[in-house]
Image (cartoon, rainbow, N blue to C red):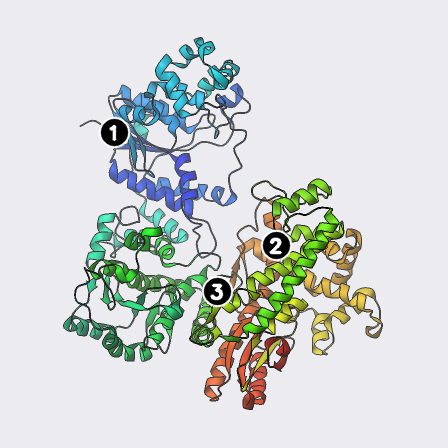
Amino acid sequence: MTTRLLLVDGSSYLYRAYHALPDLRTSRGEPTGAIRGVLSMLRRLAQEFPAPYRACVFDAPGKTFRDEWYPQYKAQRPEMPEDLAAQIPVLHEAIEAEGWPLLMIPGVEADDVIGTLTRQALARGWEVVISTGDKDLTQLVGPRVLWVDTMRGEKLDAKGVEEKFGVPPERIVDYLALVGDTVDNVPGVAGCGPKTAAKWLQQYGSLEALLAHADEIKGKVGENLRAARDFLPLARKLLTVRCDLDLPVRLDDLQARPPQREKLLALYERLEFQAWLNELRAQGVAAPAGQEGGDGFETPAQAAARRSAYACITDWDEFERWLGEIEQGARVAFDTETTSLDARNASLVGVSFAVGPGRACYIPLAHRGLEVGPQLPREEVLRRLAPWFATADGKVAQNAKYDWHVLAAHGAEPGGTIDDTMLMSYVLESDAQHDLDRLSRRWLSLEPLTYAELCGSGKKQIGFDEVPPARAAAYAAEDADLTWRLFEVLSAKLAAEPRLERVYRDIERPLVPVLVAMERAGVAIDPKVLAAQSREFETQLRVLEQKAHELAGRAFNLASPKQVAELLFGELGLKAAKKTAGGQASTSEEVLERLAHEHPIVEVLLQHRQLSKLKNTYLDKLPKMIDPRTGRVHTTFSQSVVVTGRLSSSEPNLQNIPARTPEGRRIRSAFVAPTGCLLLSADYSQIELRIMAHLSGDATLVAAFLHGEDIHRHTAAEIFGVPLEAVTPEQRRVAKTINFGLIYGMSAHGLARSLGIDRASAQEYIDRYFARYPGVAKYMEQARKTAYEQGYVETLYGRRVWLRHIRSRNPAQRQADERAAINAPMQGTAADLIKLAMIGVHRALQEGGLATRLVLQVHDELVLEVPEAEVDAARALVTDQMQNVAKLRVPLVVDVGVGRNWDEAH
């Protein structure tokens, strides 16, 4: 049997893995995506191409001989991303621990090492497999040399190279010289693409022959060829892989080695590669189902076998057997399959359960079509399951709020505690994505069956209820199975982090039923008020448009960024402060605000844009979103989107209605109370400044709040050195800007822009502020230091806000994270407090038997719908719950208002 040498272009693997995988990180924030990807590919490759000799070859840092030939070689290659560079030492350690000889030879490139080892192996009569994504190495392909791209599943022998590129391996260097190599900054012939290069080489045979006949090539591309004639020989030399290096390593040194088990255990524990840890710990015993793949990810055959074990329940005997398992299960995951992502309006198609890893079933209830077969009646199945949903402990779901809505709408209202793997993941890594597919890859090394694989995509996509139950079971039961497995992994992670576990247990999990009740309740809106406002806004927009045309001296489209940019930066000569991703001058709101003082037309554009946004987003859209069944608008609150812990609102977003402008407040007047009720608004007063006082412990700031002083007036008195009673409105305005600006990490430059003063004056204000509030200055410095040391900051309750760029060499990214390090603990603590208040208010209303109900949460404000007879009781209850939700160094103050509409109440 011929001896095989397996050579891997490690540098190619590294970049491809980094860009192919999501931003995977450990619970401590250490990036691991490139490590995981490279090791997975190496394991898969070694399985497909077993070889007694192998090596993983990386480019060494520093210059090579090619830089001496051509100083511009690779000069345009961007600097390696920091989070990728940080993974390289650990990756190298892991590769060697896995038993791969690792080569990184200074002064030469990985390609040249691979080329030289290939020639040496061929001289011994061996066969060589080269694994890379780099087409340059196809020049080495021959009778006993195979080129393999594992990511594309591509294998090229000499015939394959010629079919792919149009030239044989021995002409690949000529081909590359003509088309150029942008990665290595080697220019080719302008206008000469792959087809032209292949055609020329097929016609003339070689680069030398082509150049000898260059005068025969017609047109512009012929001119370009002749212009490049002097450089092309150097290009060919640069792109030729060296095969004659004197390497400090011999083929005999490349024998595959046994894995270093203890070292791998330590590495994978640190990197949190759970499936691989399980594999190592098994010591030869089969790993748990779904984790037995040799590369950490199960093979398609293993996935098919796992899915084939799931049960599809279509008769009562089997249902009763599974119901017994479900009722006796200490931990049971469930999932609903429906016709829509809109939980309130989705029709239930089926329900799945998992009672252990790999032990899952699906109960089809409302599939339709020719291949449906027998199904159990939905109403009867839910009637029998309802007691378990209502009372059982140990229930687990992924995005439990969705399932709660669906089940409740079909007569099986859940009760008790439901653990939610989406929220568990969110608490552990708030800046990650928490869908089931990603979580399964991240924590279980399993590749789930996707909805598109089952139902198709685009115009050909079918509804889940059109999928035959036997096929649907593989997808639906898998969802429950993966959720069960995820709970086991994520609960262990949380148990190791007691503060995070409390955030999940005391804040996120008990908030779910509160949000379900709020989304179900919705809020009443008067469409007539919105229609009247829309007509008024339309009139105002026409007036603003006419004014803008007069100022411009011509007509133009105020809604066209291109036309606005041409006017502002071309005709009026204003300075473009920013560019769009496409390289055009930006006309964003931020840019316009900076230019507002430079020309009167900018203020008109800003007013027009703001009015137009309000009209399109709210006045015209909200009436269309009124549910005809309830006559109310029902937003969706999301817990797992904002990294600081704040809730987000969508479809419609009711949290972005501006409250500080007259127009925004008028929109709030359309949110009304039904007959016999009023709206009650309860808003935390200056919550983030109070949290700053608590976290910093600054004696002066704490004392001001304890004495109930106007904090902005107090700050003005401190900064300007005047008595409280002598503070002017302008001084208070400056102080207010500083108070709020500094808790968001505002710099002197930012403060100067906000106040319309020079930078030196702004810096003087900041210096005075910190001199009067030294505790605040100390807190800010410590926050930045803590963030730098551990990669995250925490709220008062222990919620983590990850700052992935705090050590970045990119100043803009680093400074943004430094600002976030100051503000995130305050914003996150405020989010924790309002969530705890919502839980407390909801519980107290239920225990008190009141009909009052929460309908909205907007930042630091709660809005409740209150029967007129309960106003006093509700006011007292809400105030008590919000003010006493936590004991800080300073009192929490709540402003409460009541009115027929939201604007009156706020």
Residue at 25% of width from left, 38% of height from top? 48
Q: Alpha-carbon distance for marks 3 and 1?
A: 59 Å
Q: Earlier in the sequence, mark 3 or mark 1?
A: 1
SS state under label 2: helix
Residue 4's mark? Answer: 1
Q: Which quadrant is home to the C terminus?
A: bottom right
Please rate how many residues cluster around mark 1, counting C-alpha atoms within 10 Å: few if below 14, some from 14 to 19, many from 20: many
Residue at 52% of width from left, 69% of height from top? 623
Left or right side of 391 for 738: right
Outermost residue on the left side: it is 317
Q: Alpha-carbon distance for marks 1 and 2?
A: 52 Å
Q: Where is residue 687 in the image (x, y as percent from the top left)?
A: 63, 71
Quadrant of the rendered structure where residue 796 is?
bottom right
- The residue pinned by badge 3 equals 651
Left or right side of 228 for 241: left
- The residue pinned by badge 2 equals 818
Q: Which of marks 1 and 2 is nearer the N terminus?
A: 1
